[in-house]
Amino acid sequence: MMRMNMYAISSNGAFFLVDGTLTQYDDDFSNIVDGSDARKLTNPGENIGMLRDNKTLIIESRQTISQADTIFFKMWGMQKRSYQMQFIGTNLNRPGLQGFLEDTYLKISTPIGLDDTTKVTFTVNNDTASASMYRFRLVFNTVTMVALPFVFTNVNGYWRNNQTIVKWETKNEKNLSQYTVERSVDGQRFFVPVHAQNSSTGTYQWLDENPATGNNYYRIHSIGIDGTSEYSKVIAVFVDKSSESFTVYPNPAKVDNFNLQLNNQEAGLYEVQLINTFGQTLVTRTFNHSGGSGNQKINFGRSIPQGIYQLQVKSPRGEKKLISVVF
């Protein structure tokens, strides 16, 4: 079986269950909707079910997966906040069977464990597409030869020396044709090919010598020799082309390694606030800067749910600057 529990994440980082689904597999079940399935009843808050034959189910009974299968999720009543989907697989694992959660909004695919628990965090923001009813689906595939058997182990970027530096690392890299770095500003994407290495571990760096001022979003598109492809997570880099700026690195950020680079800044007491998409301040920290350029490591003292945040930096003169940060 595959159970999916959906949790909402409150502003203080607490998790609470809002809904869930269950799909069970056996040779005695049928793939058509019948008495072994249970219809979804709408609750007053957030809802998630599974779409099959124009019916929304909360429990679905299907035949044992032989080649391929898909769970089509349908969600509604979502609020502007972060959520976590917990996938609990039981006795589904067998040679060649793989599961991937496809996010049509971020256009990313996340591997899902078939005999353990996988947690996937997502955010509903001001973009109506982020709350699309049909944003997610869980795809099962049976493969005998993996065309693109690798994973992105690290993706980050930062603004330095008047150019954006995007770095990524891969593991178990085989059968790759090239990578493409995609930059998004106001919905436009640009493609710059970087040839892949066929090695056990690949490390890459790409320079964007002409980024736009403000937020630049990047993702890495890997392309196999047979045309198959995968996307990395999305990272954000804030570009300030003036001589005085702040930079967060790595970005996506890590709670245990969060660095604020100060470039040509005045000396004095600085205040930083981490603000979520609802305008709520999650963490406030202060530090003294001796002036000029330097790095300040910031300890949040708590876990931060995955999503896009704003880091507000307040200078000793009271001036405020916002930096987009992805966790």
Image (cartoon, rainbow, N blue to C red):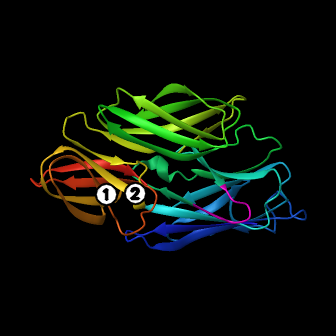
Q: Which mark is residue 297?
A: 1
Q: Circle 2 sits on which residue?
A: 257
**Depth check, front residue: 181 or 35:** 181
Q: Which residues are magenta?
A: 112-119
At numbered mark 2, what does the secondary structure look like: helix, strand or loop?
A: helix
For label 1, count other residues whose C-alpha is less than 10 Å away and answer few (under 14), some (14-19) or many (20+).
some
Q: Are marks 2 and 1 in contact (CB under 8 Å)?
A: yes
What's the CA distance linking mark 2 and mark 1?
Answer: 7 Å
Looking at the image, residue 315 sits to the left or right of residue 261; the answer is: left
Please state which amino acid type lies under the numbered disc 1: Lys
Height in image: 101 above or below 264?
below
- The percent coordinates of residue 325 (x first, y second) are 37, 50
**Depth check, front residue: 110 or 259:** 259
Pick whichever of labels 2 and 1 is earlier in the sequence. 2
Quarter of the picture holding the C terminus: bottom left
Height in image: 232 above or below 311?
above
- The percent coordinates of residue 86 (x first, y second) are 60, 65
Looking at the image, residue 161 sits to the left or right of residue 268; the answer is: right
**Depth check, front residue: 149 or 139:** 149
